[in-house]
Image (cartoon, rainbow, N blue to C red):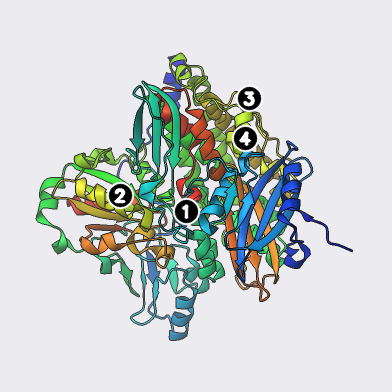
Amino acid sequence: MSQPEYIKRANTDVPCRLEDISKSDYEVFYNLVAELLKKESNHCLAYYPIENEGKLVFYCFIGDDSDQSVTILSHRHNKYGLILKSLTPLCNAMHIFEREIHETFGVAFEGHPWLKPVRYPFDRYDKAKVMDNYPFFEIESEELHEVGVGPIHAGVIEPGHFRFICNGEKVLHLEIHLGYQHRGIEWLYLDKDSPLQRCILSECIAGDTAVGHALAHAQLIESLAGIQIEEDLQIERCIALELERIAVHIGDTAALCTDVAYQLGQVVCEALRTTIINTTQQWCGNRFGKGLIRPGGSHYPLSEDMATKIEKNLENTGTRFRKMTETLYSMPSVLSRFDEIGTVTTQQALAVGAVGMAARTCNVPRDIRASHPFQYFKTYPVHPVVLETGDVLARGMLRSMEVTESIKIIRELIATWRQKENKAKAPVYDYHLKPGSIAFSMTEGWRGEIFHSAITNSKGQIVHYKVKDPSVHNWMALALAVRNQEISDFPVCNKSFNLSYCGYDL
Amino acid sequence: MIREFNILRSHGIQYVPDLKKAELTPLFRGRPVISPSVTDDEKTMLRKLCPSGAILENDFGIDLGKCVFCKECAFACPGKISFTNDYKIASNNRNGLIIRPGNESVGFDETRIRKEVRKLFRNSLKLRQISAGGDNSCEMELNASGNVNFDMGRYGIEFVASPRHADGIVITGPITENMAAATQICYDAVPHPKIIILVGTDAISGGLFSESKAINRSFLDKYPVDLYVPGNPAHPLTFINGLLKLQGK
């Protein structure tokens, strides 16, 4: 009997044996993926190759939001001079994966419309391509001018270069050139073979999403090592993840206020964010939740005392934040800066493969907590907040609605947690990973879908580690959002997304 | 308008009145304390355990310039290593960051402070921030240093939008190869005299990234560093108190 062309798994499921995944011809793979991606509930989660004895073995993960399944497909080729027919013309969202593969392995994708560098990794295929000669899109015209911003920006934020082509004050095109933050994280996962080092690396992928990434990593390890997690710890992890979401959403509301010079909103939200991150600090000693998530257990099991503190702080913060945003989003001077500014249409969001909150503001209900649940969200149903207008106002409002929703989630989770037996366990660092396997894990960080995947060799050592931050997709949504906007609206558009540079550059 | 007054009233007074005496939650991972009774076997075990090579086995101590503050050493050696909530751990001396058994504070070397720093920057210090591979947690803490709670502006310290307006640079992140050139250009654009401040373990030693092939720390070989602010990320109080010491306040 011949092997099926693909394998189906659920999020954080048992790993697949590599030999069980059949390596189809590219033609078969291409047709299968093209067929799968026609269905609107499907989107590509990750697509990456690993090098093995001069061959490239590609793995592609396609998630179906309607039935919680993930389809894993594979194809294999000789590495040198490889030319493949691009999937991007059929499904635009594949553009970033093919660009990444092209940049690292030199694979040519025929028919790819925008085969540009992604992040200039140290191990890129073509070393002649350097940061300074990025091939920006150009328009020859005497009427147009270009504006270059960065890599170092005016505020205290991460580096990236933005090149605008403007007609007067109006932006015709924005191209975002990243890569400045590239630290070689995926390579370090292999170089640093201590389990603890890998945990800490995960917390540093994007320091503003320390819990989201650390949880994705912990789940992946638990899947590969066959470690079961008790329900009380699952709930605690969900609470930590929602605290992170609340803190960032409030902080970003402050930043939006700053950009439209609404000082009251800025200072009130800054102070409220401080309360939330200080609550996380009370729990685990770090304002960003670093150290809180570990595979197999926790150094900081939730105590009744801490749970009460969380409830109290959230209640107070929630009320004050609601009053603030009710005022904020009813002020004409604020609305004129947010309403119908930086609009991303549903069609555009689907085309760029937007995920997380950026997608949910465009009527694309992508939320891993609901579509591919993990931890206690498998039991506790999450109802994603979805808006339709896709503008700065929607991204601002969605944040305040998600804060309300997350507070409710935490309150209910704490109530459930109280009924569970407290089985505090220490973290597990001496695990053995299942050999010859591939596994993946997803979480819904505050930005959106976080995907981690690892491949082990016959000795159970990790030989490939892949991380995908939601920003990988969403940067393109920002580039589209500012088209035909005043260039002076770029800051509010940028803040409304608040994408990760280091998560993209890894 | 009335609604805004109500919001303002419930907002209350948020600033921390005395940034030198503020107390952090007991669990905050600040300056470690090491007992002199750590055995040689434990030292070896701890060196192997430490994810970032911060445990010095011979001449035993913890190097806060390398420490990622995961506290795993304290969990492995309870009673012998503990992390206090002392956030005053910035130093102008790289070796001052090494905590030895029995040490009760981080070393700060007054004699190394350049005269012009005290003379010119005492009441006004404008800084340009360069994130060179930072993970955005240190950057967020630096932003928080100027927010309504910590308000370092009260000491005349602020971040400015151009290196031309700055008295020095604040680097976060291990300095990636892809940011090496921009870091140099930014530093060159700051008028003399100027200071360099490294914030976060990644910036001070490279942290977990020190052996990455994607970083290039040659910039730091060329110039003296005026202040090291450890942390993962560095707490706003650590940063502000470090600056105040540098200013002589």
Q: Residues within 10 Å of mark 2 (few under 14, many from 20)?
A: some
Task: Give the residue at mark 2.
Answer: B182
Chain under callout 3 = A
Q: Provide residue A292's location: percent of width, then percent of height.
A: 55, 56
Mark 3 and mark 4 lie on one chain; the one further toward the N terminus is 4
Closer to viewer: mark 2 or mark 3: 2
Chain under callout 4 = A
Closer to viewer: mark 3 or mark 1: 3
Q: Secondary structure at mark 3?
A: loop
Task: Give the residue at mark 3.
Answer: A388
Q: Are marks 2 and 1 on the same chain?
A: no
**Do tag 4 and tag 2 residues touch (Cβ < 8 Å)?**
no
The Cα–Cα distance between marks 3 and 1, rounded to whole angstroms, is: 36 Å
The Cα–Cα distance between marks 4 and 2, rounded to whole angstroms, is: 34 Å
Type of the residue with mark 2: Ala
The Cα–Cα distance between marks 1 and 4, rounded to whole angstroms, is: 38 Å
Residue drawn where x is 59% and y is 37% of the image? A352
Closer to viewer: mark 3 or mark 4: 4
Q: Residues within 10 Å of mark 3 (few under 14, many from 20)?
A: some
Q: Are marks 1 and 4 on the same chain?
A: yes
Task: Give the residue at mark 1.
Answer: A286
Chain under callout 2 = B
Task: Report if residue A9 is visible in the image.
Answer: yes
**Do tag 3 and tag 4 residues touch (Cβ < 8 Å)?**
no
Task: Give the residue at mark 4.
Answer: A351
Q: Name the residue furthest right.
A: A1
